[in-house]
């Protein structure tokens, strides 16, 4: 199939994702305005704007105070912290729980692009407007990168499109349109994974490192490079018998992982410099005297009560119920993959088939790859031939020949879509995040905490496109329900069966 034949379909899909992302942002804007006009917000901290402790600046009253007030009314909850940090810097200890990438972007836009609006609506409204623009534009780009990543991994443009649309309308969408760090993190983490899979390792390292400057869980993205390094070193040592090459891969992989940690560690050092150095022992905060002075962990524990099993209280049961839909989806996606590919999970991908290793060479073997070539391959895969291939594959699923059970496709043992070995590092990543959200964090934030995990949308797209997964999914949920630590999620079975019956 020629490239020209595949381009219309791909450009059409990309255009659909772009339209879905923009439409979802406008829809949320309209709903937010409507909601605020009908009901009084629970958080009334938006009008509070005390003078900065350091370097206070004064501006004349805005010429359009009503418009300024309308913009500032959306600055609630965590948005208050991000806008305040952009305006005044890190004034108080608890402010260091919010990483600096989003405030830095807000500050930069307020002093450049939107600076002419300061006389009209005031500086704080300009800061808020900058935050809204940064977060919503970042989300649109995150959706496009999500589609590009999904095409490469799923090798099915239709499934990638469906998963991308689900991402555009995910349950945590309001946080992606508000002044929260979710949009920037999603853009950097998904985009970083895309460049990693495409073979552009240096760009991937930069993007994933910036993700740890946006959110603390960005440091977990170092695991993708750790996974790649492990497989490439094994391939170089066992397959090519080149010990020096394997050692070089291990060293370079370790350096890349460290580089991803650097922004978060540097920010902790910045907090230590501001809060601890130059103070007497009596003035020092308790965390300053610790052997490893981690400001972020202390703030989460001291101000928000975050800690292992600290949220397991009867009064928090409604919050566990609030988080149950996303946790149920995540747990079911993990269990389904483990049941479908037990040999891949047990061996951490080292028992992948020859066909699978050739298609995921960037992670599972040491081969030089070129991002443009990988992208072109993925784009060409979305030709009419692939559509026919998907139709035949789905017919096999309807006849009981489920891909997850090892049936071949065109004489090959390569598995596509959600059951591909390529999904494994994403499954490991989301598994760690699920455990953290359930056992350590305030569980009600699980919806937005897990909302940037691509595997959840790939799994949702998979079960929507495969009618015969109803029975298998029911078995998966039964397994999850019987597990002692997952009893709180048992009600997910009814939700999923209801979802499937509605289809």
Image (tube, rainbow, N blue to C red):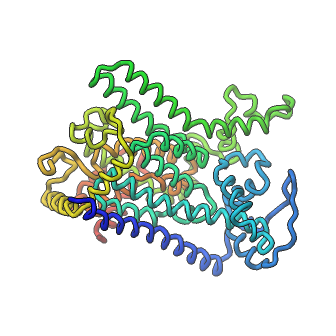
Residue 481 seen in the figure: no
Query: Which is nearer the eye, 438 or 233?
Result: 233
Residue at point 18% right, 57% down? 393
Query: Residue 72's x, y, as percent?
Result: 72, 69
Residue drawn at x 31%, y 33% is 365
Return the residue nearer the eye: 119 or 421: 119
Q: Nearer the viewer, residue 239 or 399?
A: 239
Q: Residue at x 69, y 43 (%)?
A: 299
Quadrant placement of the N terminus:
bottom left
Q: Is residue 88 above or below residue 500?
A: above
In-image side of 256 versus 495 (left or right): right
Q: Vertically, is 133 above or below 307? A: below
At horizontal 68% and vertical 54% (from top left) the residue drawn is: 103
Give the total number of marks visible in the rendering: 0
- Left or right, residue 371 beside residue 382: right
Question: Looking at the rendering, which quadrant does residue 470 occupy?
Answer: bottom left
Q: Quadrant of residue 181?
A: bottom right
């Amino acid at each position: 199939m020629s490239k020209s034949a595949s381009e219309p379909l791909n450009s059409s899909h990309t255009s659909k994702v772009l339209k879905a992302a923009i439409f979802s942002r406008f829809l949320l804007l309209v709903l937010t305005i409507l909601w605020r006009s009908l009901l009084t917000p629970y958080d009334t901290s938006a009008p509070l704007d005390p003078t900065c402790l350091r370097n206070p600046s004064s501006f004349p009253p805005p010429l359009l105070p009503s418009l300024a007030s309308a913009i500032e009314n959306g600055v609630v909850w965590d948005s208050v912290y991000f806008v305040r940090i952009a305006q005044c810097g890190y004034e108080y200890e608890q402010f260091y729980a919010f990483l600096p990438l989003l405030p830095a972007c807000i500050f930069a836009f307020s002093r450049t692009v939107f600076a002419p609006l300061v006389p009209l609506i005031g500086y704080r409204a300009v800061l808020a407007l900058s935050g809204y623009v940064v977060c919503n534009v970042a989300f649109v780009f995150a959706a496009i990168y999500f589609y590009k990543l999904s095409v490469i991994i799923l090798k099915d443009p239709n499934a990638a499109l469906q998963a991308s649309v689900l991402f555009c309308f995910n349950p945590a969408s309001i946080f992606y349109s508000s002044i929260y760090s979710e949009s920037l993190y999603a853009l950097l983490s998904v985009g970083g994974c895309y460049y990693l899979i495409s073979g552009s390792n240096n760009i991937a390292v930069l993007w994933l490192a910036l993700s740890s400057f946006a959110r603390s869980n960005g440091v977990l993205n170092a695991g993708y490079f750790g996974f790649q390094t492990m497989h490439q070193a094994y391939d170089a040592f066992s397959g090519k018998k080149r010990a020096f090459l394997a050692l070089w891969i291990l060293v370079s992989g370790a350096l890349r992982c460290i580089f991803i940690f650097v922004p978060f560690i540097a920010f902790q050092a910045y907090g230590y410099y501001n809060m601890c150095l130059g103070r007497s022992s009596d003035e020092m905060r308790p965390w300053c005297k610790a052997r490893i002075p981690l400001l972020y962990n202390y703030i989460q524990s001291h101000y928000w009560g975050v800690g292992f099993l600290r949220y397991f209280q009867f009064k928090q049961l409604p919050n566990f119920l609030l988080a149950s839909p996303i946790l149920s989806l995540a747990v079911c996606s993990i269990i389904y993959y483990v049941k479908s590919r037990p040999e891949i999970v047990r061996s951490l991908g080292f028992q992948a088939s020859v066909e699978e290793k050739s298609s995921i060479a960037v992670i599972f073997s040491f081969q030089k790859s070129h991002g443009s070539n990988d992208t072109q391959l993925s784009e060409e895969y979305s030709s009419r031939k692939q559509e026919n291939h998907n139709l035949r594959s789905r017919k096999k699923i309807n006849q009981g020949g489920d891909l997850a059970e090892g049936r071949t496709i065109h004489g090959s043992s390569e598995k596509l879509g959600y059951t591909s070995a390529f999904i494994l590092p994403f499954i490991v990543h989301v598994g760690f995040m699920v455990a953290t959200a359930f056992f350590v964090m305030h569980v009600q934030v699980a919806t937005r905490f897990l909302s940037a995990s691509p595997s959840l949308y790939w799994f949702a797209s998979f079960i929507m496109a495969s009618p015969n997964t109803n029975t298998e999914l029911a078995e998966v949920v039964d397994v999850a329900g019987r597990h002692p630590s997952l009893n709180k999620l048992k009600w997910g079975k009814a939700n999923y069966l209801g979802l499937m019956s509605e289809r």
